[in-house]
Amino acid sequence: MSHLKVLAEQIAHYGVQHVFGIPGSGTSLTLIDNLRQLGVKFHLVHFEGCAAIMAGTMGRLSDSCGVSVGIKGPGLANMLPGMAACSLDSLPAVNITEAYPPDSPVSSAHKRLDHLQLVSPVVKTSVFWSESGSTFKTLAQTAEAECPGPVHIDITGKDPCCHGEVIQNKTIIPESCDEIFRTLDKSCRPLLLVGSLSLRQQLTAQLNAVGVPVFTTASAKGVVDETLPHAAGVYTGAGLEFAAESRLMDDADLIVAIGLRYNEVLSVKEFPCDSVLLDPLGEVASGDFGFSHISWIENKETWQEFWQRFEGLGWGRAEIAESRKQVRQSLLSHGFMPAHVLENVNLFFSGKARLVVDTGLFCTVAEHVWPAKHPALYIGSGQGRYMGISLPQGIAASIYDPAVPTIIFCGDGSIGMFISELKLAVINTLPLIVILCSDGKFGTLRGRAVKDGLHEEPLTISSPSWMAVMEGLGFNAVRADSEDGLGRVLQEWDYSPLFIETQFDADSYMMMTRKIR
């Protein structure tokens, strides 16, 4: 199986340090052994889908790609949900599974599924690994190319001397920037609205330096330091009266978007003023916003010219400050709620902890009150809103950089999906806190049931406490039902895995974001 040794060497040479998965008794076990001999650490998970999510999270944080390994057939089927999550949230990962050789007879049926048909809806490409085929570097770069996502590799017991076609993403250059620059020159109140592309283009320094309002999509949260006065927060297209987007969008005379794509917002609509877009994919992923001009910038000099257009411009800070004030007052006015937990955790760590949020009403709260200073300090499923993703993402983030405390914020619906993976936190003694926000309901959905007079039983969690389970996994498990109680728990934390269970009034919980989104 020399071709697998070549693959392992190429993975290690590319700089991959961690691989996640569940091995079989065949080629996957051989590959993992080769990787271990080269210093690449293998992390055994309990569900293949989590391995794919962890690999994608590694890719997101390292600006490279992560790697997961599994077996053929049902192993790949289990990995598929995680690969779909990576596709939805633009996380670069190479997912490797055992396979039958492409010329094997139909009678070789044990665990056999059509891998290509299975993965084709969610991967950028699927290939058989061969020394004569594409290199791992080429496949990794395909995963990382705009727009990032998963790539799949089938490995067999012998070199099949064939491979699938690598689909290279095509950069589309719509038009020159001249018209966009002329439009910018006429603007007095421009507003920047940036998507996750801005993370991959590393635009943080420039966005921190401008004086005009900067909105991000949820998946780009932190690309501008949200403690700065011109950071307007998260734009979703569905913001209500207290949200900054409801104040500033009508006051701007130009919307300047960078990588704003329809899958990164909740509601797509045309803007109330002129709007322009910078995006290498052109209008392929942004056509419904109605941009008047679309272009892209390839060279450093033109980027410098672009940022110079914002020099001397400044507005919107009073509106942003008022929005922050109203949002904060609203979210803190319902008794002990998730906003109190987030605020106290952020103050305790002085803004130097990493928050990983799942999807739910508490996620809406986090997007608006947690001031992310850097994109590596906030992770969430901003595009896919994939329930349960926070546990594998938080574990992978803590493995990637254990010097930063990681706080997972999850709810009743998401805590149980992948809870077994928390054994990795115990095994590796990770500085990880898991906070359960519990109202005993699916709070995000309950508002619809109450409004329409629908039965709430399908949205009610039986026995919502996870204290005993977390203690059984090796976590220190405590309850915190007040700010004082939470403060004491944080003061006593010894940086080993900790579970904090918080419980909230269901009716107040349902209403807490009513004027925000």
Image (tube, rainbow, N blue to C red):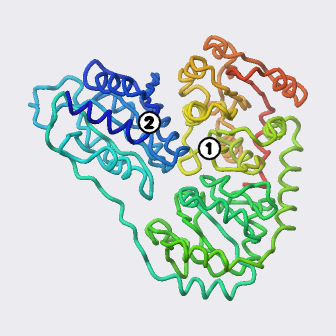
The quadrant in which the C terminus is found is bottom right
Indicate which disc residue 379 carries: 1
Q: Residues within 10 Å of mark 2 (few under 14, many from 20)?
A: many
Q: Nearer the viewer, residue 447 or 500?
A: 500
Q: Position of residue 506 (x, y in %)?
A: 77, 34
Tell me if residue 271 comes above or below residue 66 in the rendering.
below
Residue at the disc numbered 2: 52
Q: Is residue 467 left or right of residue 35?
A: right
Q: Nearer the viewer, residue 228 or 443?
A: 228
Q: Is residue 12 left or right of residue 18?
A: left
Q: Position of residue 490 (x, y in %)?
A: 81, 26
Tell me if residue 242 comes above or below residue 448 in the rendering.
below
Callout 1, which amino acid?
Answer: Ile
User: Residue at the spot x=48%, y=47% of the render?
Assistant: 91
Q: Position of residue 117 (x, y in %)?
A: 26, 43
User: Residue at the spot x=63%, y=81% of the render?
Assistant: 274
Q: Residues within 10 Å of mark 1 (few under 14, many from 20)?
A: many
Q: Is residue 158 left or right of residue 419?
A: left
